[in-house]
Image: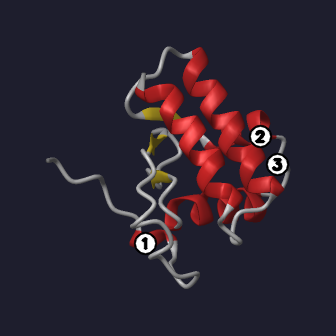
Amino acid sequence: MDELKILADFFLAAQNDPRIGVNHLGVFASLYQYWRNLNFPVPLKLFSYEAKQLTKVLSNASYYRYIKDLHCCGYINYIPSFKRTEPSSLYFNIINQSENGKCGNGKRFKAFQAPTAE
């Protein structure tokens, strides 16, 4: 089952990734559990205020930093809606160890792109 592989691969990759800290692990695990409770919709649609409650992150800056880091490291694909009435989209990625870590820390939200169709 790909859903369980995503979680197992994330924790395996995070062990060897110095950019991922305990807060990143908590955010990823909380979002994954929410996704699981909703029966694995693709994409996961949620508002930031919902996600902040789920992840127990109080600060907007901290929440977006963890999401940006997880996105840039390739663990998730986050597509912000930039609209108050539309939820953002989040995709969980299957980790490819050879491509993990190609993103630098200088990326900003404007660099987020929708996943490409294969």
CA distance for labels 3 and 2:
5 Å
Q: Position of residue 47 (x, y in %)?
A: 58, 39
Q: Which amino acid lies under the numbered mark 3 shown in the image of this protein?
A: Val
Rendered location of residue 98, percent (x, y): 40, 66
Question: Which residue position is annotated with label 3?
Answer: 57
- In the foreground, 80 or 104: 104
- Can residue 97 be seen here? The reply is yes
SS state under label 3: loop
User: Is the residue marked by circle 3 packed among few (<14), some (14-19), or many (20+) residues within 10 Å?
Assistant: some
**Tag in front: 2 or 1:** 2
Look at mark 1 in the image and give the residue it sits on: 110
The residue located at (47%, 32%) in the rendering is 44
Give the residue at x 52% y 76%. 108
Quarter of the image for residue 15 reads bottom right
Q: Which label's residue is closer to the chain start, 1 or 3?
A: 3
Total tally of numbered discs in the picture: 3
Could you say which is closer to the camera, residue 84 or residue 107? 107
Where residue 22 appears, as percent x and y from the top left, is 82, 55
Q: Amino acid at mark 2?
A: Thr
Q: Amino acid at mark 1?
A: Lys
> Quarter of the image holding residue 70?
bottom right
Does residue 35 sit above or below 53 in this rendering? above
Q: CA distance from mark 2 to mark 1?
A: 23 Å
At horizontal 55% and vertical 85% (from top left) the residue drawn is 106
Quarter holding the N terminus is top left
Q: Residue furthest bottom?
A: 106
Query: Secondary structure under badge 1?
Result: helix
Residue placed under numbered mark 2 in the picture: 55
Q: Which disc, if any, is residue 70?
A: none
Sequence order check: which comes first, mark 2 or mark 1? 2
The residue furthest left is: 118
